[in-house]
Amino acid sequence: MNTPFPPVEFDAAIISKLSQSGPRYTSYPTADRFQGDFGYGQFLEAVAGLRMRRSRRPLSLYVHIPFCDTVCYYCGCNKIVTKDHSKAAVYLGYLKQEIDMQGRLFDGMGQIEQLHFGGGTPTYLSDKQMGDLMAHLHANFDFADDAHGEYSIEIDPRTVSVERVHSLRAQGFNRISLGVQDFDPDVQKAVNRIQPEAETRAVMDAARAAGYRSISIDLIYGLPKQTMASMTQTLDKVIDASPDRIALYNYAHLPHIFKPQRRIADADMPTPAVKLELLAMCIQRLCDAGYIYIGMDHFAKPEDELAVAQRQGRLQRNFQGYSTRAESELISCGVSAISAVGATYSQNEKTLDAYYAKLDDGVLPITRGIKMDNDDLLRRIVIGKLMCNFELSLSSIEQGFPIKFRQYFAAELEKLKAFEDDGLLTVDDEWISVTPKGRLLIRNICMVFDRYLGVAQDIAPQPLRYSKTI
């Protein structure tokens, strides 16, 4: 696959018809299917299996820093809002202990080619704490050099100086992701995130001067007080700033799950019709500005590694979204973090007390997970290929698994006919191919192959734990 995909097509009628709740497929099986009987012992078995097979797959490392100074009302992340920075010092002590344990387990098993710091707000840590933590990671793992590794960090431009941006680069980060969400002052006030454009631009300018390989911006559509006019102005500023990647997230208003969202007034929320108009306008503007629609909520410049990986068929999805490093073992450290090792997923304890207690007992702080069977592994590949490449070679699946695709997935292929009738995909003897019109609804298409969702998607509404597919 060496040519860009044709532009995505926006069909409001089809989107309105098919909009429903569903997984984002950062994993399959999805995290809500993890079981409490999967723990430290099962994780050790998975690592031992890799070592027995002499696996030399590259390693990916995720580090979760849960702390924030202030709460953004829209946020649904696993976070701890506190101005007491002494809590971070305690957390770092335990985090280093977990890193030591993981480092011993994976010693000699491959290089770290990808590192991502997420949160919370990773830059809640002081410059000294971050430098110390990075040194600790390098002491426990073998990292690829700067030219070959992808080392990224999420930052809050409100809390990071120009000097700190340069310091983070010197500490080993070569990609930077900025939370922006919206530049409009009224929207920022409604979500409790006041962030002047000049502040954001200063951080981006500093990142370019410091030699970061990629700058990414996060935006959200569907926030309170957003209008077509306000979003147009935000996009003008974003396009002028020219980030390498843009993530455009759909705001999922789930106040019954996320308490901070209860501070958002229902009257300030854009209607579903306006949300669709906002999405259509954002896609059109970004594509007109030269960005490639990667999928889901991601856009990238054609020369960015994300777009290149997609053209070369190397794109994958993990818990941070789309990723360039296919086939890596993902080791995750920190409260609530999720690892993907061998044929397993495992998640750490979600509260600090429980996380600390397990480490005090000398075991990794795993609270739940899943060991995949052959059907899970098969469906994970099918869903992953569709999410990343928007097409699936049936024969390639048959070469990797002892099945006849049309027999094994007879029921799923029958369900796909409705999408085919709507012009969202085509199915022939060799390929399932998603059309430009179907790309925005890729989650709906992939849900057909999710055996855990059970009955036909057009009959059974999905639980409220999932966001809308679009």
Image (cartoon, rainbow, N blue to C red):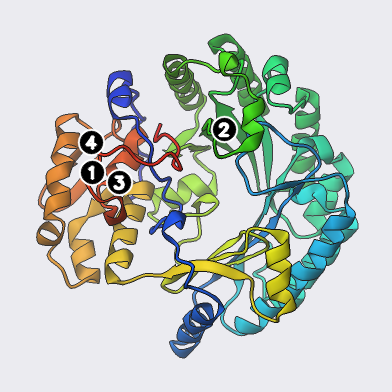
Residue depicted at 49% across the width and 68% down the height: 36
Label 3 neighbourhood size at 10 Å, few (<14), some (14-19), many (20+)?
A: many
Please, what secondary structure does the residue beneath circle 2 have?
loop
Callout 2 environment at 10 Å: few (<14), some (14 to 19), or many (20+)?
some
Question: Which residue has dot 4 on it?
Answer: 458
Tag 3 secondary structure: helix
Q: Which residue is mark 2?
A: 255
Do the residues under discs 3 and 1 have CB atoms within 8 angstroms? no
Relative height, residue 345 to residue 191 (above, below): below
Q: Which amino acid type is marked by label 1? A: Ser
User: Can you say whether 166 is above or below 270 in the image?
Assistant: below
Three-letter residue code for mark 4:
Asp
Q: What distance separates the C-alpha of mark 3 from that of mark 2? A: 25 Å
Which amino acid, by three-letter code, is at mark 3? Answer: Met
Pointer 1 residue: 433
Residue type for callout 2:
Pro
Q: Position of residue 147 (x, y in %)?
A: 65, 61
The Cα atoms of the two marked residues, 4 and 3, are separated by: 11 Å
Per the rendering, the mark at residue 447 is 3
Q: Are marks 3 and 2 in contact (CB under 8 Å)?
A: no
Residue projecting furthest to the bottom: 52
Which is closer to the viewer, label 3 or label 1? 3
Tell me if mark 1 has few (under 14), some (14-19) or many (20+) residues whose alpha carbon lies within 10 angstroms of its own.
many
Q: CA distance from mark 2 to mark 1?
A: 37 Å
